Image: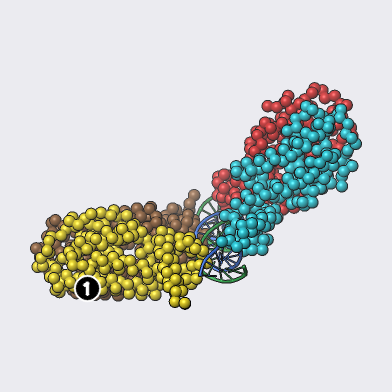
Chain colours: A yellow, B brown, C cyan, D red, E blue, F green
DNA sequence: TATGAATGAGTGTTCATTCAT
DNA sequence: GATGAATGAACACTCATTCAT
């Protein structure tokens, strides 16, 4: 019978982390109070401490769980056998749908990471995972001849992850969505087509084609 | 009658902003205390309030002054008549020299901006300035035939600013410097050479050539 | 589910207001610290903020509760069928017993009221209540012929309230108690007997008869 | 030549005390800052300390100077050979003209006095002076037969001082001016006519005759 | 498990006072 | 005399954390 308990506990933790994600995103990690989180979850402040020893531990859990959603989106857009510019466009749309204009949390996290080695490591691991997904996607492209054989896929992958993060910084600074999308698509296209001069893009894809 | 002239006040503000930049970068804006800043400046806490009405106002001043350094670097690397990959490489090196691994402040700022419309506007203005510098640089390149006439220079410019910011996110997540530089160079090259298939790069520039 | 029931909260507030009354009276509202109050209650400073959002709110609550005691005394001395000079004398004694020489709080309140319209209104309401009690008392006297039919009872009532407050100002300025009592009795007697020349005071009451 | 200096100093002190009176009255002694006072005087904060060793000393000086104005009014209204109800009425009008609705300062002073024995003594002395003025005025009345020979003039005098102070408390609590004046006149009349049943008031004076 | 009252260290801010100029 | 920059001791208020129930 102690079997159900841990499951319950896990489920409770999840609900808390979810709520924390929303609260921290709205108010910022340091400004948000445990009370805010408790209220969002619908429990008492004390209850939070049954599941997380401290605010920081809750934040850590959040940092570890947050990327999961992103990974799902990555998987579902960059793993299919389709035009990569469509993938990029869809990725943008999905991310915007998922996070709205709430990019604050990412920067909250980066900001903390700059002073928290353990968080930094965790972030690094996560990015490595993202990189893996993308690299295998790009390898398929390369095999199909859309990317030059001698491309430095790893660097390009980091560059594209960086590009995405950077597009977020532009949006959080108020760059209008359409311009942000253009920059993302134009940048992404450049990253993967520049060495593809000999390869035939099955169809000429331009940011214009996929712009929403 | 002020004996010490108004310039003194400006100078004092500058010293405070400078110290605040270091303190906020080390500890984070919210965790850093006014006492920390005061100690770094070498004055009493009360003195800070002679120059800034609140911690937030000090932070705002910092946010407005911080980009100046970056603009200097931008100007001095992207305005000369030289190979743009060298510019990119030099830019990377200068930024690393300037900020070390202290990117926390950027994210602190982005994070606050996501909840502070006024700060957001200020950031936007700044980025527009950066964009101007870069666009005029890229226009020169285009005139020389290194970039295709029909390129969307504005989007490419945003993408490159975004790329840089994104590279910072990778570094703050622990990506080793050399890999970060590769990603930056590879990405930057891609952004501006992809449509230049017909144009002859005077010399084949690869990340390897300029990597430190 | 609150285990301790809401009454507890009310009770706690009362204890705090009571302590605040003593502390503010001793040190003055502005000089007294929340810590002083907390110590007097025997709780931590933070606890105070569970019940009152601010020092000012606590002061307001005090201002609203303070008159209650006075009303009790008014009721119990001025509502019975007895010689009004005895009532006045008893009132004086009860007030002195209740407030000792701690009249500071009244002036604290008046002082704040002069700059706080809401407090002013609240004070006004309270005084109107006092006036009601007194007027109905005096009406009885009038019916019995101790006060002339054409007296302006309302003005006399205000005057007597004013007289009492004024006697407090004399005491706080160091007028010895017996002299203060004489002034109060002499004044009070004058207020209500001056037009009673034809009416027979059942017994000649002089300040001397009732002076303690 | 050092003769002019002390005069100048005295004059400077006066200007400061005057400004302090206005500032303390508006904001309250404890809330007003030395900067507020300095600004009102038109000098620097530091200059204040050339004339007063501390804020408290400035307040003390104010407390000692403040009553002077009142004494002038007392003298000019209660020393002439005229109907005393007219004096009372004129006194009211002059006080209102002089202090407007700014009674805050009185209560500020009483409030401080309750905790400051030295201030208390000073207040006491002042009131004794007032009492002297009034008593001699009333003695004249008595000699003319308007007040009974056996009246306790001293108590009546205290009562009338108290009555006035009390009327101020009513006004600061928002009692409308006309009602306050009625209460004052009605009360004052009562104080001095009640024992005058045999004496002929030269003319029947009622609050109505002199009410504005 | 869950609650929420209580704690107390900590923080931004104010301001009387000082003092070099 | 006069200035105003600087000080530093307070103080109101907050909030992560604890714990009796």
Q: Determine the residue positioned at 69% across, 32% down.
A: D179
Q: Residue at x 77, y 51 (%)?
A: C98
User: In the image, D41: left or right of A110?
Assistant: right
Looking at this view, name the residue that lies furthest to the bottom.
A2
**Viewer-proximal residue, B86 or D53?**
B86
The residue tagged 1 is A136
Residue C177 or residue C204, whichever sits in front: C204
**Quarter of the image where one finds residue D148:** top right
Task: Name which quarter of the figure residue D162 lies in.
Answer: top right
Left/right of residue F10 with respect to residue D146 in the rendered view: left
Q: Residue at x 56, y 61 (%)?
A: C1
Quarter that holds the C terminus of chain D: top right
Q: How many marks?
A: 1
Q: Position of residue A77 (x, y in %)?
A: 24, 65
Viewer-proximal residue among A29 and A7? A7
Residue C148, horizontal then vertical, whole percent = 81, 29
**Residue lying farthest to the front in this orientation:** A1
**Direction from residue A37 to residue C161 in the image, left or right:** right
Q: Is residue B191 visible to the viewer in this orientation of the structure? A: no
Instruction: Read off the chain for label 1.
Output: A
Mark 1 burial class by Cα count in 10 Å: few <14, some 14-19, many 20+: some
Query: Is residue A202 in sight in this rendering?
Result: yes
Q: Which residue is depicted at the point 81% across and 34% down? A: C141
User: Residue D185 at what x, y percent from top left?
Assistant: 74, 31
A15 up-or-down from D72: above or below: below
Q: Residue furthest top?
A: D203
State whether residue A48 is above or below residue D192: below
């Amino acid at each position: 019978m102690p079997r159900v308990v841990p499951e319950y506990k896990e489920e409770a933790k999840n609900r808390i982390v979810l709520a924390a994600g929303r609260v921290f995103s709205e108010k910022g990690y340091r400004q948000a109070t445990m009370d805010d989180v408790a209220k969002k979850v619908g429990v008492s402040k004390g209850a939070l401490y049954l599941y997380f020893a401290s605010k920081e531990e809750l934040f850590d859990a959040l940092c570890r769980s947050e990327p999961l959603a992103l990974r799902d989106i990555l998987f579902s857009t960059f793993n299919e056998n389709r035009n990569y510019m469509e993938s990029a466009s869809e990725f943008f749309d999905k991310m915007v749908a998922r996070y709205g204009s709430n990019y604050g949390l990412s920067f909250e996290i980066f900001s903390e990471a700059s002073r928290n080695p353990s968080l930094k490591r965790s972030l690094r691991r996560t990015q490595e995972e993202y990189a893996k997904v993308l690299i295998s996607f790009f390898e398929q492209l390369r095999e199909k001849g859309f990317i030059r054989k001698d491309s430095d896929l790893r660097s390009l992958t980091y560059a594209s992850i960086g590009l995405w993060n950077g597009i977020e910084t532009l949006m959080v600074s108020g760059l209008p969505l359409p311009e942000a999308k253009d920059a993302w698509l134009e940048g992404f296209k450049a990253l993967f087509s520049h060495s593809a001069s000999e390869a035939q893009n099955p169809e000429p894809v331009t940011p214009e084609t996929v712009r929403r």
